[in-house]
Amino acid sequence: MTRLSERVSASLPSFVATPAYERSGLRRGIVHLGLGAFHRAHQALYTDAAMAEGDHRWGIAGVSLRSKSVADALIPQDLLYCVLERDGEQVSARLVGALHAALHAPSQLDEVLEAIADPQTQVVTSTVTEKGYCINPATGDLDVADKSIQHDVAHPESPSSTIGVLFAGIRRRAPAAKLTILCCDNMASNGDTLRKLVLQFARLVDTATERRIESMIAFPSSMVDRIVPAATSESLDWAEERLGVRDEAAIVCEPFTQWVIENRFAGARPAWERGGALFVNDVRPYQAMKLRLLNGTHSAIAYLGQLRDLETVSDAMRDPLVGPFARRLMTEDLRSTLAAPADYDVLAYCDQLLRRFENPSLAHRTQQIAMDGTQKVPVRWLPALRATVDAGGDLPHVERALAAWLHYLLTQRSDNGSALVISDPGAATLGARMRAEQNTNDVARAALGHRSVFGEAPWPDAFIARLSKHLAALRSGGVGALLSRAFIDGSLARQQPT
Ligand code: CS2
């Protein structure tokens, strides 16, 4: 089968929209760290739209910080790839032309640092996942015990971590050159958080650069949203059938996309609003809404789904226990903890989210979302839970979801006994703490004592007792006992108008 390239792009089927600008004029204006599927299906598309009217300044130098596989897939394709948006039988597609380079930091570090230092680079964006920032999830501080941070502090010219690479690139920039660093990962106040991490790193290495970061670099926050399952051989084959060419970097994702960006840039920026991005003064209400309602529910679906051997989110949504539970977790518990952005119909937003989760054509694996829970849970569930239980209240669904996550880490088995793959570097110590205890009350206390996830402050006894009860239900009868009919029906009854 012919491989996608500039040469064959003219013969793509007519349902594939192609870049509305001349790629030969493309200049580099953005460096992106973390060239995974999410960036390629999200920010790169907005950048394509921003260049549609001939502003060629925003070509993206995409950087992979670990694996070379994305660069290897893209380079033979002249850095072109397709995004196929799929909902049921409906498909639309776009050929994306915004990439200017695909770099592999471990083998091309100098080129990466030069790209960040280049005065034409106005914006650095990042999607490196939560754990890619070497953050202590409970405090939001740089994890100075992390091996890659320790290495990069000792050898700041040859960094391997995201923070170390950012710092080394900034250090090479001309002192008066402004720059905007835009974090696009699922963390609350992600811009402020990244700024804090970079400054904490700089303080350990060189305070002159620290001062320059403080005065010359803007770190706006942003909320990003699009469900982008990892590519599989099936999704690549499916794309090939539709495209008539082989695209090793093709992405199949949902049609929905959203990007809300804090309007705080140090220099020039692409006109991402042409692709539908919304620029606002305060992104925090949008972030809280998305992180709690979408990502919070996603994580619950992921752990319950894993325990019940449900492979995808849409399988879980069809499950008679998990589906109704997910709806209530979102619309009752999590919604009650939010101050929504002005003029936002949160219930309509929830309905839309649940429909997105039901999309049967996405094959979004629960195992993918279940990854890195020790980073995700503190962002998605714990702020709401902490505020509620400290005020003497409860969040019955979130508390059950938390018990399910702990049980999943503890047993590493589904309710049917199949072995589960736990992919979370932070989970081993938490799992070991729990396994050292016998009765569920001690297990709950041991887990909540894991400070890098659950924070320093003690959790109320009443909450620990409830968590212990849920762990006991899971131990005796799995998810079926945790989400008993009586509970599901009871929470349904609570929802009825009186
Ligand atoms: C998911 C997110 O994998 C996960 O943890 O919850 O990647 C989610 O699909 C996106 O944030 C949707 O915008």
Image (cartoon, grey):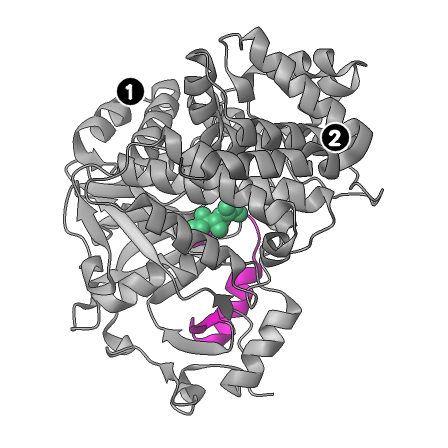
Which picture quadrant has residue 13? Answer: bottom left
Q: Which residues are magenta?
A: 63-87
| Front in this rendered view, residue 155 or 192 | 192
- State the quadrant of the C terminus: top left
- 310 or 92: nearer the viewer: 310
Question: Where, by quadrant of the figure, is residue 189 drawn?
Answer: top left
Taking the spot 74% from the left edge, 34% from the top edge, the residue there is 481
Left or right side of 126 for 329: right
Q: Is residue 145 above or below residue 257?
A: above
Q: Which residue: 62% across, 56% down?
A: 318
Q: Secondary structure at mark 2?
A: helix
Residue tagged 1: 207
* Label 1: element kind: helix
User: Is residue 16 on the magenta stretch?
Assistant: no
Query: Can residue 60 be seen in the rendering of this structure?
Result: yes
Instruction: Please identify the residue farthest to the front as the structure is shown.
Output: 498
Nearer the observer, 211 or 10: 10
Whether residue 64 is in magenta: the answer is yes
Q: Position of residue 370 (x, y in %)?
A: 61, 42
Separation of disc 1 and disc 2 at Cα? 51 Å
Image position, residue 222 (x, y; %): 30, 43
**How crowded is the residue under tag 1: few (<14 C-alpha within 10 Å), some, or many (20+)?**
few
| Place of residue 402 in the rendered image (x, y in percent of width and height, measured from the top left) | 60, 29
Residue at image point 39% right, 76% down: 95
> Where is residue 208 drawn, in percent x and y?
25, 23
Residue beneath the point at 57% across and 84% down: 241
Location of mark 2 (residue): 474
Quarter of the picture holding the N terminus: bottom right
Q: Residue furthest right?
A: 417
Packing grade of label 2 (10 A; few <14, some 14-19, many >=20) is many
Tell me the mark number nearer the camera, choosing from 1 and 2: 2
Going by the image, does 189 lie left or right of 157?
left
